[in-house]
Every structure is written in C-alpha cells, then in structure tokens.
Amino acid sequence: MIVFPVALVRGDGSFSIIEESAPFVGPGDVQHPAEAWRLWSAEDWAAMCPGWRLLPVLDDPPAEAGRRAERLPVDEWSISAEAVEVTYRLVDLTPAEIEAAKPPVPVTVTNFQARAALLAAGLFDQVNDALLALPANSTARQAWEYANELTRNGTLVNSMAETLGLTSAQLNDLFRQAVTIEA
C-alpha cells in the first residue's frame, strides 16, 4: 500500500511529489488512472513505468531554539536509493514570531508564585522592602501580605512594575514564569 506523499522518481532522476491518489502521465506520455496508486503491485509499476521508482518522502524539519525551519524548494531536496528527503534551512525568528510563540500571559498567579518568581528574578527584596515600608493599613501592603492571587492588570502589580522600571513585556514574562512554579 502506498503512503502519501510519495516521490515518483523518473528514469532520468527527476521526481515529482505526489500528495494524493490522482491520474498521472507515465513514460511515453501514457496517461494512467488514479486507481493505479491503489491497485498496482510492484510488478505492475515495473511493467507500466519501467525505470521509475516510488520512494517515501522523509520530512523531518530540524528544530533549534530561537529559529524556525524553512522548507527549501523541491529541486533542492536530497534523493537517495531509499527515499527523497525534504531539506530545510534554519532562520532566526523575528521578534513578532518570538512573542507569538510564547504561552499566553496568565491573568492571575498565586501570591506564592509571584514571590517565587520575584526571588528567581532577583527582585523580591526590592518589592518586599517597598511594600513593607507602606503603612500596615494600606491596601497595597495588605494585598502583598494576604492576597491569595495577584492580578496581571492589578494596581499593585503595575505600580510595582513601574517602580522597578519593568516594561510590559518584562512583566508578562515574569507572570509566565510565575505560573509555572509549583509549591
């Protein structure tokens, strides 16, 4: 049974990639029906299309952090006796692609997660000292000490981000990091 896509390699070494069962023109410009893909045996292929081979298409894009695999044109793919291999080049991601690949920014994180992320980022002491310097009855201090969750768009979070000089993107990344932390 033929598994698509398949490379139809002609006697001269040129090939076509066949994505699905469809009529095709064989040697001597003979038109063959789509059923050939399903019905022909290896012997039928050898008799009807002498010198032609069917090879699997190997498509295994490389992966590298910060880069994406860009498929090269078919005429740059490699062919061997066993298969036709799709070739790629790695290109750097654009800033927009890097941002789009990030997980969504969580709306909230637990107070523990926020504190742990601030510790990991080396910001905990600055935040803690600033908030503990506030009067005990201030809403911001109460939120820091007792809130179960901190909200990304909340007043406390954004005022502290401004105090620390964090950009919106940096704050988003801090929340992304925080949500991954487990107690």
Image: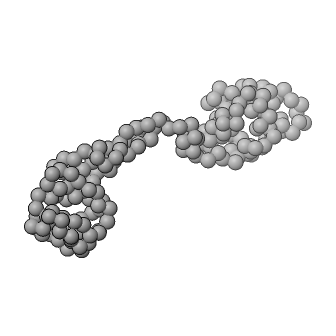
Q: As displayed, is residue 149 above or below residue 19? A: above
Instruction: Please state if 176 lies on the left or on the right of 85 as rendered.
Output: right
Q: Quadrant of the C terminus?
A: top right
Q: Which residue is more in the foreground, 37 or 148?
A: 37
Nearest the viewer among 83 and 147 is 83
Residue sitting at 80 percent across and 34 percent down? 159
Where is residue 85 shown, x and y percent of the image?
A: 27, 48
Residue depicted at x 78% and y 28%: 163
> Where does residue 44 sit, x and y in percent of width and height?
12, 69
Place of residue 177 in the rendered image (x, y in percent of width and height, measured from the top left): 61, 39
State the colouring used for the structure image: one colour
Q: Is residue 54 visible?
A: yes
Q: Quadrant of residue 46?
A: bottom left
- Tell which of 173 and 72 is nearer to you: 72
Figure quadrant of residue 10:
bottom left
Q: Is residue 14 above or below residue 130?
A: below
- Residue sitting at x 40%, y 38%: 90
- Residue at x 17% of width, y 50% of height: 13
Residue 183 appears anywhere in the view = no
Quadrant of the drawing holding the N terminus: bottom left
Task: Indicate the quadrant where residue 27 lies.
Answer: bottom left
Percent across and percent down for residue 34 are: 26, 72
Count how many numbered circles sit on residues in the image.
0
Q: Is residue 144 left or right of residue 175?
A: right
